[in-house]
Amino acid sequence: MKASIITIGDEILIGQIVDTNAAWMAAQLSEAGILLASKMTAGDDKKSILTALDRAFHDADLILMTGGLGPTKDDMTKTALLEYFGGGMVFSQQTYDRIEKLFVKRNIPISEAHRQQCYLPDAAEIIVNEMGTAPGMWFEKDGKSLCSMPGVPHEMKYVMMHGVLPRVAAISDVVYRQKTIHTSGIGESQLADVIEPILESHPVSIAYLPSHGAVRLRLSKVGKAGEEAQVEDTLESAVAPVVEAISQYIYGYDGETLESSVGKLLLQKGLMLGTAESCTGGYIAHLITSVAGASRYFRGSIVAYNNDVKESILGVELKTLEECGAVSEETVREMVAGALPVLGCDIAIAVSGISGPGGGSPAKPVGTVWVAVGSKEQVMVKKYLFVKDRILNIKYTAVYALDLLRKFLTAR
């Protein structure tokens, strides 16, 4: 089975927003063992949508569309689908009742535009969208299938997970299994040097997916429907030696993140964490608190961006700041020591650096960052040089700080 993705919207064509929908859908299709034949973006006009539909039905057996289903006049998807599949519009009382129930809870009156949104092509099977007002629509034509979904990402994902992927799994003649291994502290080429010889004797595919100081390894195996056990055994036999060879760099698997991984370690060891951040401006705390339940192991953060804050709140000595500078091993060590009692935590992360684009010097160029992780008894400190732009320097600092925390906790 092959699939094609169509995203609709002038705002995507002109670069006003990034098309994250297509990337997410492509990943879901890949995990289901479905090959992607094409991805297209059509403007908010009927002609462009119809042209994209012709191309997609030529390329693929399954077409996934997002966008253009709202209540405003520029939403042309329904009109184009009606022309493409034929038939007429019928009022969906089910959709209207759900919108009315949603709006009553929020004390919002239903407009005529929302009522018009409930008229749907009679050739479509409705897929309920509990996250918004526009339902998904499933069409069949010439032995091929199309699902039209809202463009709002969380609404599209709901329709995909509850309405599309179960159908796809039922009709697919392919079985696909994968295992994602998350690593940090080692580069893509170094990983390849270790892993490639191992996989020479294992019939699986591998993809290296690097990002901001980490590399995801995706091992996968494709087989025919009915061969699930064989595919899983083949994949597991390849994963085991890879994991053994790179275990010191692994922080998690599949849906885990570095921040969720260190959270588990903190919980296991019964420790509370705090952060003292300068160049990252609270980004490390943001990552940590993005994990549900982080309050069980995270106390809080001090964004000590100004030296006065480092001195007055964290207790960094004025002499240290004057003689060693804010971006120094001595400063981050003192930031850790000050954060522990102020935040009432067992472990603290401290970072100070030069994110750029200005502020660097020959001795401390832009991208110079000091990271410290420690307790009352022990502190680990490391210097990094990230030759990126400002935002990337901040992201890299956060990842490397969390990885240093992972190593610190693992060694305890």
Image (cartoon, helix red, strand yellow):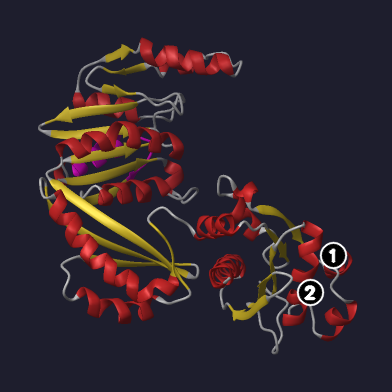
Residue 152 at least partly seen: no
Identify the residue shown where x is 23% and y is 38%. Answer: 53
Q: Main secondary structure of the magenta part?
A: helix
Horizontal and vertical percent position of residue 213? 49, 70
Q: Amino acid at mark 2?
A: Glu
Q: Is residue 100 left or right of residue 106?
A: left
Residue 311: % across, % down: 87, 69
Q: Is residue 75 visible?
A: yes
Question: In terms of secondary structure, where does tag 1 sit?
Answer: helix
- Please report the residue visible at 78 percent of the width from the left and 70 percent of the height from the top: 337
Q: Which residues are magenta?
A: 41-56
Q: Residue 120's spot in the image, x, y percent?
A: 32, 19
Determine which residue is flagged by label 2: 334
Relative height, residue 281 to residue 96 (above, below): below
In the image: residue 99, left or right of residue 297: left
The residue labelled by disc 1 is: 309
In terms of image quadrants, where is residue 314? Answer: bottom right
* Quarter of the image where one finds residue 245: bottom left
Foreground residue among 85 and 303: 303
Residue at 14% over, 48% down: 174
Front: mark 1 or 2: 2
Q: Quadrant of the N terminus?
A: top left
Three-letter amino acid code of the residue under disc 1: Val
How many residues crowd around disc 1 within 10 Å: few (fewer than 14), some, or many (20 or more)?
some
Q: Quadrant of residue 363?
A: bottom right
Between 167 and 236, the residue placed more toward the observer is 236
The answer to if 361 sits in the magenta stretch is: no
